[in-house]
Structure formats: C-alpha cells, structure tokens
C-alpha cells in the first residue's frame, strides 16, 4: 500500500467519527499545491547529476504551512504528499498556528561530498524560493538533512528576499537557531513514552526499550529515556542493530557513533538485524527511522506492549488492526513526534521577534504542550472508545475542519 493511501485510511476512519461530509473530506484531503522540480548539479568529478525535488503544500487554513525536508533515495511524490498531510493534522493536534507541508529530494545524501550537498540544496531553493517563505511555507530538518542544510537554505533564500531567518527552522545556533530544537523531537518522544507508561501503570524506571534508527530522533529519544531510568536494550541504524539484555550504555554509544557513524560493533553488545530488533522481547518499541516498517508480515511477532511512533508513518493499516486486536497500545506519529515542529514554532516566533529564549523556557513550553496534547488525545480515546490514532486524528481534523469552515473557501 502506498504511503498516501495509508494516510488516507487513517483520515477516513477519523473523519467518519467527526461526522465530516463527503465534500468536506475531499476538500481537507486535497493538497493546495504540489511542486516537482529538476535539481541538476555538477558533481566534483565534473559529471552532471540530475535529481528530482518535491514540495507539497497540503493545507494553510490554520496558518503558514510547515514541514520537513527529506534527502533520501526513497523519496517520491506519493510519500511527500502523505507526509505533508500528516503535518496538517500534527500542527493542529498540538495547536500551533500552522498548516502542513513536506518536501524532499530523491538522493542518497551519504554518497555526496559536502560541496555537492550544498549545491543540491541551493539549486533546490533556486527552484522553489517563490512558493516558500516565513508566512507561506517554512521547511525544517528531516531524514538526511540537518542544521547545516538549513543554514544553506536560509542563505540561498536571503539572496532573493534579504534578511529572513524565519524562512526555515532547525538552523544552527550561530545563525538564529533555537537552543533545544535539535533535541526536541527525541525529547518529545521520551515525554510521550513516559506519559503512555504512566497511563498503563508501568514504571518508566527499568522498562525495556528497543529503538530503530539512531539519527537525530532515535539518539535523543534514547538519551532522554536513559535519563528517565529506562533500560534501552536494543538500537539499530541502517548498518544493523545491537542488543544487550543488561541495557546499552547510551551516553557511551552516542560518543561511539560520533566517531564511527554507526552503532554496529559497539562493545559488550551482540549484533542483531533490524527485523530482530522489531520483534525483540521489550515493553516499548520505538520505530525512529523509515516509514512502513510495521506490516501485516511482522505485526503478529511484535512482543512490545506499547509502540511509540517516533518515525512518520511506520505502521501499515493492516498491522495497526492486528495491534488493536492484540491489545498493543500504539501512540501515533502525529502525537509522538510533534515535539520537533513545536520547537520549530518556538524558533520561528523568536526569529520574528528578534528575541531569544533560554533553553529552559524552550524545554518547559515543549513539555507542557506535549503533556497536554497527550492527555487530550487519551481522553478522546477513552470517551469515544477509539484507538489513540483515531483520537489524535479526530482532534487534528476537527480543528482544521472548523478553521476551514470559519475562514470560508
Ligand atoms: N528530525 C526531526 O525533527 C523529525 C521530526 C518528526 C519526525 N521525524 C521522523 O523521524 C524519523 C527519523 O528522522 P531523523 O531526523 O532522526 O533522521 P536521521 O537522518 O537523523 O536518522 C535516520 C536514522 O535512521 C537510520 N536508517 C536509515 N535507513 C534505515 C533502515 N533501512 N533501517 C534501519 N535504520 C535506518 C539511519 O541510519 C539513521 O540512524 C523519520 O521518519 C522522520 O520523518 C523527524
């Protein structure tokens, strides 16, 4: 099943609960604009390389559109559209004044030199600068992009529009970034994990956790869960996974991956595959890499009691049904990983006011929004006897629907 079809299935389930008319469903589902551009650069060896770049602007009824930019070989129009729609429901769920967008380039960033990566980024902005901007559509980091890429985006955009730091978030601190943005998604995932465990009457101290993906989101999630006293027993990345029944030393693993670029070979752990990680004997499973990893093929083998979707779109609808039947609690992506866009919003607010917040303020405002959003979603799920995913969509779609009706077409 394609990524957008998956996103639509979840949308349909919730919009039936909200009681949206067919016409309103069509309106909310349809993206406002889809852009597909050629991104051609000269590689270091003098050869021409041509990539395809995408930006989908899904909905702006609640404010400027917001969403990450992904550099990955599997990026395509269908995936970007699905992820853009998730951003619309996510920004509404945490009640920040944005709509949803997403972008990406189908490229293996790991195979480009820093100079090539910079040229790809700048060329992409040359092609889309007209349709983005601080009050239109604000990109941010996602898989394969980071603060350096955001700095190049800001610099290239400013060549057309002048000083404009609020045109992109997730920037380096030295270039108007927000202290606390880099850790925000992982911190939010860890907070939400603790909230979910509280409601399930499981103590976070000593709880066993497996995390797929050890990039920005996976590593910060591990860091904060480790601080809360959880026992992270398995982690993986594109190179494979590692396992230790006694718990992995997370601070040391973070240092190790800074040197080696991968988790494999970390001392006092055994090697496992990514599939073995997903089915390992843990209480909490956190997919924090690619989408579509929990499928009808592996769902029955998942032993975790609780799945926290740090990655976007990691669960196929058939797997979701199996989890519901088996009593596995799934905290959906649009709630679990909303910490990133929330602190992106704080960065944008600071940039627009030309005033910086202390990191402690960023953290406490983030924690409040994540905890309040979790409680609201949990209450809807309990009151309406629906899954947390349907409850999260009910909250997001309801807010977007009301804004659309109030604003008029
Ligand atoms: N960065 C953010 O602020 C943010 C916000 C919300 C959601 N997300 C989502 O979180 C997920 C991870 O994003 P990120 O920013 O940490 O990306 P990243 O590029 O920093 O890290 C990705 C990690 O996934 C691993 N990976 C790649 N392919 C894999 C595979 N086939 N099997 C196992 N691991 C694999 C990589 O090795 C790396 O460890 C994505 O789904 C992204 O959309 C990110």
Image (cartoon, rainbow, N blue to C red):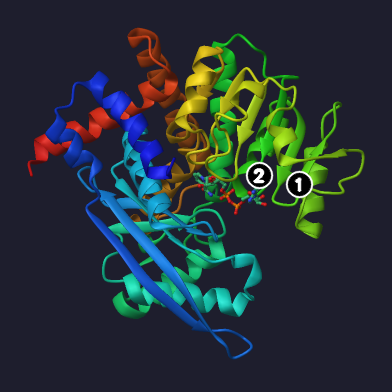
Tell me residue 270's x, y (percent): 88, 38
User: Going 38% across and 45% down the picture, which residue do you hit?
Assistant: 82
Going 51% across and 13% down the picture, which residue do you hit? 325
Q: Quadrant of the N terminus?
A: top left
Q: Is residue 4 visible?
A: yes
Asked whether the beta carbons under mark 1 and mark 2 sit within 8 Å of each other, the answer is no
Identify the element where label 1 is drawn.
strand
The residue tagged 1 is 240
Residue 2 point in image, percent of width and height: 42, 44
10 Å neighbourhood of mark 2: few (<14), some, or many (≥20)? many
Q: Nearer the viewer, residue 5 or 221?
A: 5
Give the vertical position of 113 relative to 21 (above or below).
below
Residue 331 visible (yes or no): no
Some atom of ligand 1 lies within 8 Å of the CB belonging to the residue at label 2: yes
* Residue 213 disc label: 2
Q: Position of residue 231 (x, y in %)?
A: 76, 26
Q: Position of residue 138 (x, y in %)?
A: 35, 57
List the single residue furthest toward the left. 408
Q: Is residue 42 left or right of residue 15?
A: right
Few, some or many residues within 10 Å of mark 1 (<14, 14–19, 20+): many
């Amino acid at each position: 099943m394609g990524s957008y079809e998956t996103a639509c299935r979840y949308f349909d389930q919730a919009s039936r609960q909200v009681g949206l008319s067919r016409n309103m469903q069509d309106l909310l589902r349809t993206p406002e604009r889809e852009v597909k551009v050629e991104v051609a650069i000269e590689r270091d060896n003098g050869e021409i390389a041509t990539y395809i770049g995408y930006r989908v602007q899904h909905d702006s009824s609640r404010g400027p559109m917001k969403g990450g930019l992904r550099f990955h070989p599997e990026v395509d129009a269908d995936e970007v559209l699905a992820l853009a729609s998730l951003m619309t429901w996510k920004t509404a769920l945490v009640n920040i004044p944005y709509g949803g967008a997403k972008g990406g380039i189908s490229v293996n960033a790991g195979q480009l030199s820093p100079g090539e990566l910079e040229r790809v980024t700048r060329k992409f902005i040359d092609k889309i600068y007209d349709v983005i901007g601080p009050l239109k559509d604000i990109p941010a980091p996602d898989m394969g992009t980071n603060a350096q890429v955001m700095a190049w985006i800001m610099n290239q955009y400013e060549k057309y529009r002048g000083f404009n730091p609020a045109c992109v978030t997730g920037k380096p601190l030295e270039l108007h970034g927000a202290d606390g943005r880099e850790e925000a998604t992982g911190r939010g995932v860890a907070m939400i994990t603790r909230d979910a465990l509280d409601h399930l009457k499981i103590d976070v101290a000593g709880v066993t956790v497996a995390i797929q993906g050890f990039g920005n989101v996976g590593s910060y999630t591990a860091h904060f869960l480790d601080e809360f006293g959880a026992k992270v027993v398995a982690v993986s990345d594109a190179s494979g996974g590692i396992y230790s029944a006694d718990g992995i030393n997370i601070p040391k693993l973070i240092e190790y991956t800074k040197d080696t670029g991968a988790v494999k070979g970390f001392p006092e752990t055994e090697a496992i595959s990514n599939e073995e990680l997903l089915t390992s004997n843990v209480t909490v499973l956190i997919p924090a890499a690619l989408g579509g990893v929990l499928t009808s093929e592996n769902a029955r083998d998942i032993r975790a009691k609780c799945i926290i979707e740090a990655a976007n779109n990691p669960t196929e609808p058939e797997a979701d049904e199996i989890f519901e039947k088996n009593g596995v609690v799934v905290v959906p992506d649009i709630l679990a990983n909303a910490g990133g866009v929330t602190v992106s919003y704080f960065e944008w607010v600071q940039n627009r006011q030309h005033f910086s917040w202390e990191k402690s303020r960023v953290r406490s405002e983030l924690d409040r929004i994540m905890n309040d959003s979790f409680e609201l979603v949990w209450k809807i799920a309990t009151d309406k006897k629906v899954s947390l995913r349907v409850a999260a969509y009910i909250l997001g779609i309801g807010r977007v629907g009301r804004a659309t009706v109030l604003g008029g077409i």
